[in-house]
Amino acid sequence: MAELSGNVLVGQSGGPTAVINASVAGVVAEALNHACIEEIYGTVNGVLGILHENFVDLAAESQQTIRALRHTPGAALGTCRYKLKKQSDFERVLEVFKAHNIRYFFYAGGNDSQDTADKISKLAQQQGYELRVIGIPKTVDNDLAVTDHCPGYGSVIKALCTTVRELACDHGAMGQNDLVSIVEVMGRNAGWIAAGTSLARRRDQPNDPPHLIYLPEVAFSPEKFIADVQRVLKREKYCLVVVGEGLIDADGNYIAAAEAADAFGHAQLGGAGEYLRSLVEQHLPGVKARSSKPGIAQRAAAHAGSKTDADEAFLAGQAAVKAAVNGETDKMITLVRGDGDHYTCETGLAPLTDIANGVKKLPREWINEDGVSMNFQFARYATPLIQGEIAIPHDAGLPVFAHLDKVAVSRLLPPHEAT
Amino acid sequence: MAELSGNVLVGQSGGPTAVINASVAGVVAEALNHACIEEIYGTVNGVLGILHENFVDLAAESQQTIRALRHTPGAALGTCRYKLKKQSDFERVLEVFKAHNIRYFFYAGGNDSQDTADKISKLAQQQGYELRVIGIPKTVDNDLAVTDHCPGYGSVIKALCTTVRELACDHGAMGQNDLVSIVEVMGRNAGWIAAGTSLARRRDQPNDPPHLIYLPEVAFSPEKFIADVQRVLKREKYCLVVVGEGLIDADGNYIAAAEAADAFGHAQLGGAGEYLRSLVEQHLPGVKARSSKPGIAQRAAAHAGSKTDADEAFLAGQAAVKAAVNGETDKMITLVRGDGDHYTCETGLAPLTDIANGVKKLPREWINEDGVSMNFQFARYATPLIQGEIAIPHDAGLPVFAHLDKVAVSRLLPPHEAT
């Protein structure tokens, strides 16, 4: 494999997480180690930044800033949900890459983003432009194929488990067996996040909350829900319910779908928690129901995030650069769990085509027969992902996050047609 | 003042906070220093525990457990919203106190709870039963009269400010000037909590979120709201709105009141955030609106709480015992801010009658003329309250909180009539 000299471009795509910036930090830190890499650019707002030649010079950022990215939530470079469709868009991407001698392209995102990376890679190959494209996994939804788990997932479930434990302290204070507390969590198509809250239970305390977990994988029945709640309230002072936003009924319809759909045609969901609250109020007179919805804050909760997760996100960024320099392309970094009893995690590589638009379902055999709790296999899978705390510096009582200087890279081409 | 020998009873009342257990820890720690105090009991579920003679022996808890109360949210003894009304209830309280030789009663709670403590104190005086009653302030709402601020407030606003900073990192990632993110926070009658989120702004970054804060103190106008949002979206990539749950319109009606009312006749609120979201969707086509509602989790968020707040809550518990041993009664501990430029806080005492059912309003002169932001006077008031972080031990990746053994104190009386 001949050494390929040129510039790096790294981008972020889709919904931000608590640790997607850690992957960018990993790319930058590793890129500095390789003489074949000349410039390290970031694209502002993912593929939109490529179309509009809107790049920033990441090598110009202070080391302090790059280090702080390891604990900064959100997407510091900006992200997008824009999907390249037109052939002219793809041609433009290649034109911009050629103008800036981009030879290494790293794209952190979910399955739609990996699909985009794959198409860019394929077009470069067709045109004989030597480009190495490596995807970096990212999604709180934990639903990417092949990889054992996704950076972002450990942090979101750790933050939610902390909330569940704190709610347990709060709700336990009233001794009246008449409170149903409903927490609506993210998860469009899969219950990975809702399932993850099961880790909040203490060892040997099977009656700890969450008492009931409703997953998109299990068709929702209002009758069973009310019976489940009644069963818990007979036993416990309160019933803590976790519900995934993507809950569906027996006909496969979303329980609480709104009209709008996003740019990828995904239904925009909301309201599953409020729906369950209304069921309790209708069917269980005298029982108080409260719903809460952490919303976007859950995926951004770096202050309660997982060090394991942040470290693996950084590792994935480093691994992407190493793989590309070693000649790999059109692949995504995967996280590969070791076989031993003690959790270990290395990176691997999978073809982007295997990732693009694939979805990893929560295994049915990890859900207990009651349909509202997870078994030991899930706990064994997920527990290692929430270990360790992210140390965030505070100033004047509040966390301090990185803000990029975003030194602009000079444009070399005429503007792109309006997108 | 003759030394009064006897037993201590401490109770918790009303909605739990992140630091009300720290006050109990302060009572226990201080009570151990005084030879005149024999037993240290806790009442389970506040006055309900008194009526039912449901006491636990706090001296039997391990020192480890009492220390862990300093970082444990919720109300470890249990709390209640039961309001003593019948004369027979009050008589029962005194009967139980006499049976257990309770001579020191410490009650941590808000204004309703201080009212209860005051009535118990008055009845004991009438009956010539020597009893020293000292209230300990507690409420996330920060609305108790006389005291400079209330334990619980610093922690809830610190946790919400952390969330706002993290949301800023997340929302800033999309560059499209079309997102309105609405966070509904607690605060039934006063905007103290909503106002507190203004501290999330970094120094010299006046355009940092929260961009708009809607307070119960300012009559809500849908037209102004839409104009406010449009103004922010012209300038910023997104508009982060904080809204207090108790928002009222120009006629003084709650914007989003539900039918139910709690035991004290307070309207149970909810939905101000969803209401604002619907306004955006109706009036600003093409703008995405998202609402989130941390709900009860905000008042329980010890993991993101304020060390200053937790330390002051502990101090208030200690001060209550010291005051009572020194002969004070029928008073509440207040927090008194020093005059100097450097924040200091001591405890004082105020008559319970001055506290009971009083409400401290957010000063109008701390709200800017735009009605949606706070001025430097508020920042000077609130900034010291969020300083320092609470160190919470973690096990297997999650925070570990105290759980009382609750060794029951033997009942000495026949059961109370059903309550």
Image: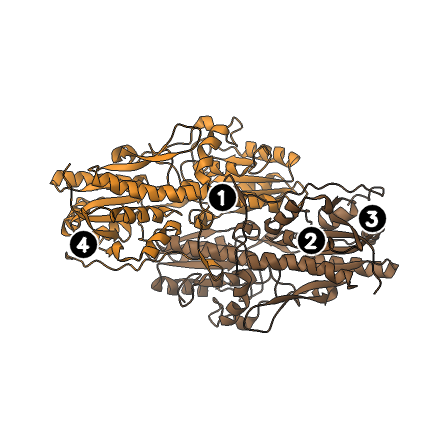
Chain colours: A brown, B orange
**Residue position for label 4:** B417
- Using residue B89 as the reference point, say whether residue A163 is left or right of it: right
**Residue position for label 3:** A100
- Using residue B409 as the reference point, say whether residue B143 is left or right of it: right
Q: Could you tell me how far apart the alpha carbons at marks 2 and 3 are, in whole angstroms?
A: 21 Å
Task: Identify which residue is drawn at 27% across, 41% down.
Answer: B320
Q: Nearer the viewer, residue A166 or B304?
A: B304
Chain of the residue displaying label 2: A
Q: Are marks 1 and 4 on the same chain?
A: yes
Q: Residues within 10 Å of mark 1 (few under 14, many from 20)?
A: many
Q: Are marks 2 and 4 on the same chain?
A: no
Q: Nearer the viewer, residue B278 or B111?
A: B111
Q: Residues within 10 Å of mark 4 (few under 14, many from 20)?
A: few
Q: Which mark is residue A286?
A: none
Q: Are marks 1 and 2 on the same chain?
A: no
Is residue A118 shown above or below A21? below
**Residue position for label 1:** B160
Circles 4, 3 touching at the beta carbon (< 8 Å): no
Quadrant where the image shows the C terminus of chain A: top right
Q: Residues within 10 Å of mark 2 (few under 14, many from 20)?
A: some
**Residue position for label 2:** A29
Q: Residues within 10 Å of mark 3 (few under 14, many from 20)?
A: many
Q: Could you tell me how far apart the alpha carbons at marks 2 and 4 are, in whole angstroms?
A: 71 Å
